[in-house]
Image (tube, helix red, strand yellow):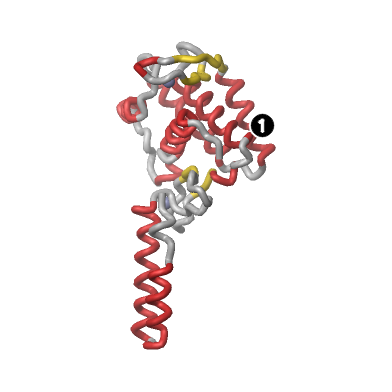
């Protein structure tokens, strides 16, 4: 898949933003302005002015819009949501080499509010994914008690868990214990269990 470093960074930001949603992690991941400022610093989001409570509410609203694109059940629906989100926020594509970075595109308008900035950059990153025909890479974690999202950038599109060290590994351990129990009950099953644990790709399937 042809995906630029900038798009990848924008995808990282939007995945992290989506996973602050109470629907994803069980509690509000952006409970206050301090959390929002932390998010901005963590992702080195540029051209952010002084943040107020209205920014927090707006960012949470945009988070909901991005989540809708992410979980849209058709490409047409995703495309229409992206178009609406970017149009609402207003976009001014321009080249920049700020802060010592190589030349890259900013799509958000100069002096845009943080929520509009995030809406436009997320919208454009998702637009590139749609254009590349890679919407299936936008995934929801398959662990039963997890609603986090991720973008599967693995070569063979085989990633199933939001984070192989937590969700993937947790399930791997559970499957391993289940096999051990089966093996203990029936000696014949031992060979199969050993083979299965050796061949099981959960670990190598990770990020
Ligand atoms: Zn930049
Ligand atoms: Zn997960």
* 59 left or right, relative to 43: right
Total label count? 1
Q: Is residue 153 above or below residue 196?
A: above
Report helix, strand or loop for mark 1.
helix
Mark 1 crowdedness (10 Å alpha carbons): few <14, some 14-19, many ≥20: few
Question: Where residue 43 appears, x then y in whole percent?
Answer: 36, 29
Question: Where residue 79 appears, x then y in whole percent?
Answer: 65, 33
* 88 left or right, relative to 98: right
Residue at (39% x, 15% y) in the render = 98
Residue at (35% x, 33% y) in the render = 31
* Most distant residue in the top direction: 111
The residue tagged 1 is 80
Question: Where residue 119 appears, x then y in whole percent?
Answer: 52, 26
Q: Is residue 13 above or below residue 24?
A: above
Residue at (39% x, 23% y) in the render = 45
* Most distant residue in the right direction: 76
Q: Ligand 1 closer than 8 Å to the CB at disc 1?
A: no
Question: Where residue 1 appears, x then y in whole percent?
Answer: 56, 40
Q: Is residue 207 above or below residue 16?
A: below
* Most distant residue in the bottom direction: 187
Tell me the quarter of the picture where residue 137 sits: top right
Front in this rendered view, residue 114 or 160: 160
């Amino acid at each position: 898949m042809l995906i630029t470093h900038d798009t990848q960074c924008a995808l990282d930001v939007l995945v992290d933003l989506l996973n602050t949603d109470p629907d994803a992690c069980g509690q509000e991941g952006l409970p206050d302005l301090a959390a929002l400022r932390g998010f901005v610093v963590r992702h080195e989001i540029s051209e952010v002015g002084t943040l107020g409570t209205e920014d927090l509410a707006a960012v949470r609203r945009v988070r909901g819009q991005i989540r809708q694109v992410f979980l849209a059940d058709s490409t047409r629906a995703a495309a229409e949501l992206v178009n609406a989100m970017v149009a609402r926020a207003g976009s001014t594509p321009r080249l920049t080499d700020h802060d010592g970075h190589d030349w890259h595109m900013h799509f958000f308008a100069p002096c845009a509010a943080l929520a509009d900035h995030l809406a436009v950059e997320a919208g454009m990153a998702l637009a590139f994914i749609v254009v590349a025909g890679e919407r299936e890479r936008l995934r929801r974690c398959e662990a039963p008690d997890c609603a986090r999202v991720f973008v599967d950038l693995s070569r063979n599109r085989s990633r199933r868990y939001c984070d192989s060290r937590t969700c993937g590994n947790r399930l791997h351990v559970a499957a391993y214990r289940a096999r051990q129990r089966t093996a203990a009950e029936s000696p014949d099953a031992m060979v199969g269990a050993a083979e299965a644990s050796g061949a099981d790709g959960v670990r190598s399937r990770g990020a």
